[in-house]
Image (spheres, helix red, strand yellow):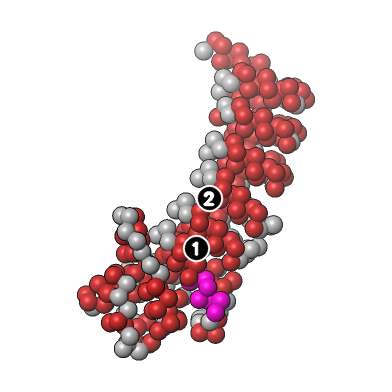
Amino acid sequence: MEPKLYEAATNGEIEPFNGIAKDNLRSIVTHNNKHTVLHVNIARQSLKNKEGESVSTKFVEQILEICPSLLIQANAKGDSPLHAAAKCGRPAVVKVLIEFAKKQPTAMKCCAKTVWQMLGLTNEEENTALHEAVQCGNLDAVKILMEAGPNFPYSANVNGETPLYMAAARGSKKMVAEILEKCSSVAHDGPNGKTALHAAVNSYAADVVEKLLAKKRHLTKERDDYGWTPLHHSAYLGLKDITELLLKFDGSSALILDKDRKMTPLLMAASQGHESLAGTIIARCPECYDLVDNRGWNVLHFLMLQFIS
């Protein structure tokens, strides 16, 4: 990309691009990252936005009118302009891109002839624009993307993370609520067999746990690759409020054993010296008091071990 064109894209100046043919405009990219002029504008203008300067979406609208196919042209990392806008915290640009796709679906040739398909474009990390928006904590962009594609079947990225899992891992009640409210059958998967509920527990986010339980109560019994339910994690960490929430929604989850040591959540709590929490679990599920691990140890063995050590 010529320096003068890079500078023009950075500053949002459309004039230098008016005389360039569409096909030529597509080939104008940066040397290493293969950013188009649209990528450059989105990224550079976001820096000005962070510095408190007023930024406009006018260049984005103008350059797309000249070359509509830039809407789906990816850079070297597979990021479309929608990815870039979500990453850079530019919800206004996210909205402009989606609105442009709605108005001119026939202008796009490849695989994104509709907004629905554009939402599903993934980069080299298999992230969609929604993954990127959640990862960056961009709530406004999340709202716009969810509004554009309610019930879109978002899948996991290369790390096994779905957008809902990522939002829960951030401990963001607002993002979790937005995703749950817009999508009735949203995927909740995470890495190593974990779910969004596991992520919320490990983020110490009681409000997110409560929101997830209201919509996906069955997650209380979901086990990760180690056989740990969300209650196992909560008991191990000694999280009283979250443990009480999980037991309130499903007391029977206290009876589930993990894979390796056949530990119940009660035994997890006792093994970590969380005596008060152990009492809370017993009160909610008295039956778990009699369960033992693979060595035949019950809750008293673990509590006694903590006492003498």
Question: Eyeballing the image, is 176 above or below 63?
Answer: above
Label whose residue precedes the other's in the sequence (2 or 1)? 1
Q: Is the residue marked by circle 1 packed among few (<14), some (14-19), or many (20+) residues within 10 Å?
A: many
The amino acid type, in three-letter code, at marker 2 is Met
Describe the element under mark 1 as helix, strand or loop. Answer: helix
Residue 74 is covered by the magenta coloring: no
Where residue 244 sits in the image (x, y, percent)? 67, 29
Residue found 37% across the figure and 70% down from its top: 39
Residue 114 visible from this viewpoint: yes
Question: Eyeballing the image, is 76 above or below 64?
Answer: above
Pointer 2 and pointer 1: residues touching (CB < 8 Å)?
Answer: no
Residue found 43% across the figure and 61% down from its top: 90
The amino acid type, in three-letter code, at marker 1 is Ala
Spatial CA distance of label 2 from label 1 is: 13 Å
Query: Image quadrant of residue 43?
Result: bottom left
Where residue 70 sits in the image (x, y, percent)? 42, 78
Query: Image quadrant of residue 225?
Result: top right
Bounds of the magenta segment:
97-103
Instruction: From the image, tell me which residue sits under label 2.
Output: 166
Q: Is residue 256 left or right of residue 147?
A: right
Where residue 156 sits in the image (x, y, percent)? 56, 58
